[in-house]
Image (cartoon, rainbow, N blue to C red):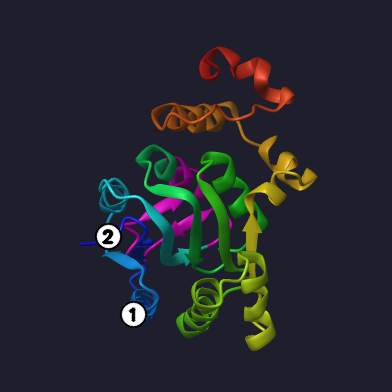
Amino acid sequence: MENSQTKKMLILRACGSAGEDKECVNIKAQAELYGISVHDHCPKTNEELIQALNGGETFDYIYLASHGNEEGFGNEDGTIDLTWMNFGTQLCTATCMNEDCIILLSCCRGGLNQVAYTLFYCCEKIAYIAGPRQSLYPYDLLIGFNILLYNLEHRGIDPIVACEKIKAGTDIRFVCFDRLETESEPAYWMHIKRFNPETLNQVNEAKEKANETPAYIPPEVSGYVKSKIVP
């Protein structure tokens, strides 16, 4: 029986590349070494990925292995194809995250600012987001997250500092975003102002289902969508 304090990790194998299995098996073994309970899923479609999020569990880590860019992520077959906005609202609706959940984006460009900005805006349960700034091979992604998890779980280091250890040890550019710090940055709010009314409506519909506080609507667009998304 799992201790009520046992941390849990959800692994989503949403890539389909040759090295994906070995990467995820390694991450699973490392997490279990630290006493983390791992739920490992290999979805083949958007629907299966969403179903994995809605399995009734709540997680401290969500590890996404996929092909990614600044717009979203998908697998090699094209049967998984989600924007970061869609992924964020699905995370919110599923209520699958514990407080201070850390999202680990094992995909190219998962550490871009606009990716973190979008996901933070979608769901208040996300405390940190970590991922690479650059395009990487699976073995680069693996060693990066190995170092991160080691410093987080074994050494008990702050997530931001733990992520800095990756570059110090490998010269690979990873970044970790802290929600509270990010929401204080002007660039974050500039990004939010670019969202169209339909996108803002999508976010607040997800937040309503998750019983979260409605998202802040920038003044530049709030008058246009107020009747749709503000309770």
Residue 166 on the magenta segment? no
Q: Quadrant of the N terminus?
A: bottom left
Residue furthest to the bottom in view is 169
Q: Residues within 10 Å of mark 2 (few under 14, many from 20)?
A: many
Q: What residue appears at the point 38 percent right and 55 percent down from the top-left corner?
A: 59
Q: Nearer the viewer, residue 198 or 146?
A: 146
Give the mark, 1 or 2, whose residue is nearer the N terminus: 1
Q: What residue appears at the point 75 percent right and 40 percent down from the top-left corner?
A: 190
Position of 6 with respect to 147 (left or right) is left
Q: At label 2, which amino acid type do we have?
A: Pro
Position of 84 with respect to 18 (left or right) is right
Above or below, comparing residue 188 to residue 220 in the picture: below
Q: Quadrant of residue 38?
A: bottom left
Q: What residue appears at the point 42 percent right and 45 percent down from the top-left corner?
A: 91
Label annotation for residue 92: none
Relative image position of residue 44 (x, y in whole percent) = 26, 60
Q: At label 1, which amino acid type do we have?
A: Ala
Q: Comparing marks 1 and 2, which lies closer to the viewer?
A: 1
Give the residue at mark 2. 43
Relative image position of residue 177 (x, y in whole percent) = 64, 58
Position of 227 with respect to 207 (left or right) is right
Relative image position of residue 104 (x, y in whole percent) = 49, 64
Residues rendered magenta in the picture: 69-89
Label annotation for residue 29: 1
Q: Tag 2's secondary structure?
A: loop
**Distance Cα–Cα, label 1 vs label 2:** 20 Å
